[in-house]
Amino acid sequence: MPQGPARLLDPRLELVGFIGRDHELASLVEWCEDDHSTRLRLITGPGGVGKTRLAVELTTRMTTVGWRCERIADGREGEAIAALRAVTRGRALLVVDYAETRVRLGQMLTALVGDDGIDVRVLLLARSAGEWWDRLGIGVPAVWDLVQAARSAELILSPAIDADVSDAEVVAQAVRSFARKLKLPERAVQIYDDDDDAPRRVLDLHVAALVAVLDKSSDGTILVDIRTVLRELIRHEQHFWYDSARMYGLSDGPAGMPTRILRQIVAVGSLLGAANEEEARELARRVPGLSPSAKVAAWLRELYPPRQGELEWLGPMQPDRLAERHVVGELVGSPKFAESCLTSLHGMQARNAVILLARASSDDIDAEVLLSQILPKVSGFVTDLDAPLEVLTAIFNVIPYPTAILASAAVGLAERIIGLLPDDTPPAVRAYWSNSLGIGLAQLGRPVQALPLFQEALAIRRELVANPGHEEYEHDDLADSLINLGIVFSELGRPVDALPVTQEAVEIRRELAATNPERYGPDLAESLDNLGSQLAALGGVTDALPVIQEAIEIYRDLTAFHSDRYHPGLASSLDNLGIRFAEPGQSAEALPATQEAVKIRRELAAANPDRFGSDLAYSLSNLAAVLSELGRPADALPITQEAVDIRRELAATNPDRYRSDLAGSLADLGIRFRELGRSADALAVTQEAVEIRRELIETHSNLRLIDLAGLLTNLGALLCEFGRLDDALTVTREAVEIRRELAATNPDRHRGDLAPSLDNLGVIMAQLHRLGDAMPVMQEAADIYRELASANPNAYRKDFAAALNNLGVLFTELGRPAEALRIIQEAIEIHRELAATDPARNRQGLVASLTNLVQILVSLGRKVEADRARIEAAKLRGLIT
């Protein structure tokens, strides 16, 4: 039977000669031949960058020098070493593709370390080294050591195969190969997309070449849009399906199947697979209007037969990204078909479906949309799945972190897995899953539930560290638990508890990085970044800056060698540095760091919006705040609006996790509007933010009360601008009540928030001519600010001066000018000191206090002094020179 054109792209056929990747290939050959190297190696990279082709070339090279090279079929991992030893005791290379989905990979590695020879190499291929790689070998010390030794040798493939090999050369070579195989004329090809400088994946280049050879519309140069080549290849592959269906009699006569049905049959076969002929017959039932069919099953098997040694009855459509694109297109195109395909699944079908969709969502926006639409169904069949523990684990492995779309499914899976762990599960494995579940809950914005899980994992890991053996790796896990616990303490507003556990993590990771910087340097940088945040939260901004800068230096060194892998960490530390510079008013120093963070995260989010969109919104918010502090509100506004737009999309997908962030961005947008004099716009978005916060209070912790109080304070100020003083009084009083209650339980954390709410409440009372009620409220605000400014002048002196200014005005209105004079003079003294170091940010406050001083001096009959203050204020305004 004829075969589809897509089969020509199978790297195992070696139809297109190997090109580029010379350095990577040489490294792998050296690894195989070095008797002292680790027996395990991992290659990672997105789909289509050439992982399998590189592995095929390696096996070809090693076979020519006498090695036995085998590809391990899915499901055969547990028996692979024994089967190998049954046929040879010589040198061998075993290749495991899709390693992150292999449920018996641990069994294979256990057999490997138990083998008495040192001449077996195992090469793993995966799209990323995620949770599955971190967990591999837990509970089996020898396997754990094997995996840890392989970590530093991980080979990460980028899209560009070689700096000296152009895309045009890759395409030309592929055109020659495909034209020769198909006995068609060679074609001249010109490829294009929106970004001609962006590296293109080798698979896309080969698809472009194949599509051009198949194109019969012109004899001239074929223009190929690299963004649509997979879709075009699917069109060619579909003609193969239609022709073969006619040969099988599936599309003949009045009862023949239309092309739409044939496409859906191929899609469901690719999505769910079939372990045997009976399952294959049942696949037709998933297509609306069809019944189980042996004829359809036989047709599918002819289209895509299983490879030699595979346990599945049906083979996969190749390449993977072509299958992913076709399946997603059919599911998106027919909700009824999608529902039929994603319900009533048994274990392996669910595993296959989630793996395909999760992979596709990493770089296919249609898959991301699909997952957002069917998430309840996906979460349902994943979390309620009656499947073995190893199947659930394989599904968990392919869910990316962080992820907006599949976060709930990840939490449900982790909960199921913990519930299925046998009684004799090693403590290290239990700690891993408690830690994983805690991470998932924290990602969903549920830190209260995450806390005991992190504490449980920490207790287990402390006990493991106390026992001898494998101290390096157990200390690393201990540091990981300490970091997670510190983060959740910070999210719960407990920086005093967060600081010591994070300091302990830094000490551990500093020792580990001293002996193995490549392996543990990234972890040290992450720990330092968290430590800097916690030091700043406790008022130690000066102490925080060098800690964060050390993290940045580590990340910069790492990105010089692994540019893609450590950019997220670098962006996080740059954001953190910008925030810490801005806190003491060093906004000019904060700007370049924050701009660089936005640039990095914009690139990351363009490639993977699900994973990095939230981070981009965070960086945009920080940049807007810095620009605002620099007196550039017009520049800050569109940046804040972009952050709001991103978070609206995320909140639509995962409201539990992202509605709180949306409320924060709306609050920022209200501030930007107000800075530009657009009070009506500011009022609308601030009210929306308040509504979101009120809804969240019903189901979340008191952290939401903190956020609500801040919004209520802002809303009260806006209502005052519209003359709605009674409404302003109500919401501001509510803010004071919330913050007073919080400050009573944790004064260090919340007194700084209580002071501005009290000050605003007093101002509103004064505007309502309730001067007697206003005085004790404003006096309390000033007293709190005095205490805070004494302990942390950089953070609070400006606000203290403003509160004194308001209090002085109130005493003036009460007819107590002598007391008002003393208070205003103190405010002016502070404003002068601040303006001397940063005139732009502090001139306005000094002018306001001088203006109030003029009125007080006039009322006291001290005209000369009043004129002197009036002239100084005019000069500061630029009215006179």
Image (cartoon, rainbow, N blue to C red):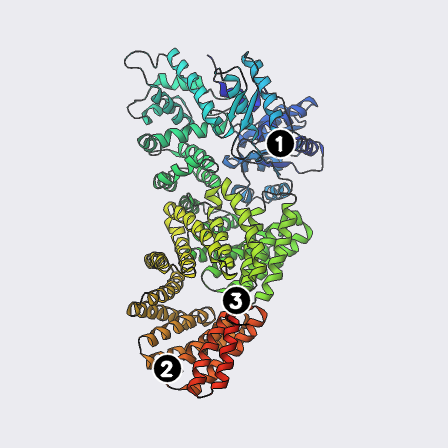
Point out the tag, 1 or 3, that comes first from the N-terminus.
1
Mark 3 surroundings within 10 Å by alpha-carbon count, few (fewer than 14), some (14 through 19), many (20 or more): some
- Residue 117 at what x, y percent from top left? 67, 33
Q: Secondary structure at mark 2?
A: helix
The answer to whether 635 is drawn above or below residue 201 in the figure is: below
70 or 244: nearer the eye?
244
Question: How far apart are the alpha carbons under marks 1 and 2?
Answer: 76 Å
- Residue 442 at what x, y percent from top left? 45, 53
- Residue 297 at what x, y percent from top left? 38, 19
Residue type at tag 2: Glu
Point out the tag, 2 or 3, that comes first from the N-terminus.
2
Residue type at tag 1: Ile
Instruction: State yes or no: discs 1 and 3 in contact (Cβ < 8 Å).
Output: no
Q: Secondary structure at mark 1?
A: loop
**Which mark, residue 50?**
none
Question: How far apart are the alpha carbons under marks 1 and 3?
Answer: 51 Å
The answer to whether 45 is drawn above or below residue 644 in the figure is: above
The answer to whether 34 is drawn above or below residue 616 in the figure is: above
Residue type at tag 3: Arg
Q: Is residue 315 visible?
A: no
From the image, tell me which residue sits under label 3: 841
Mark 2 surroundings within 10 Å by alpha-carbon count, few (fewer than 14), some (14 through 19), many (20 or more): some
* Image point (50%, 56%), residue name: 622
* Image point (49%, 70%), residue name: 844
From the image, tell me which residue sits under label 1: 161
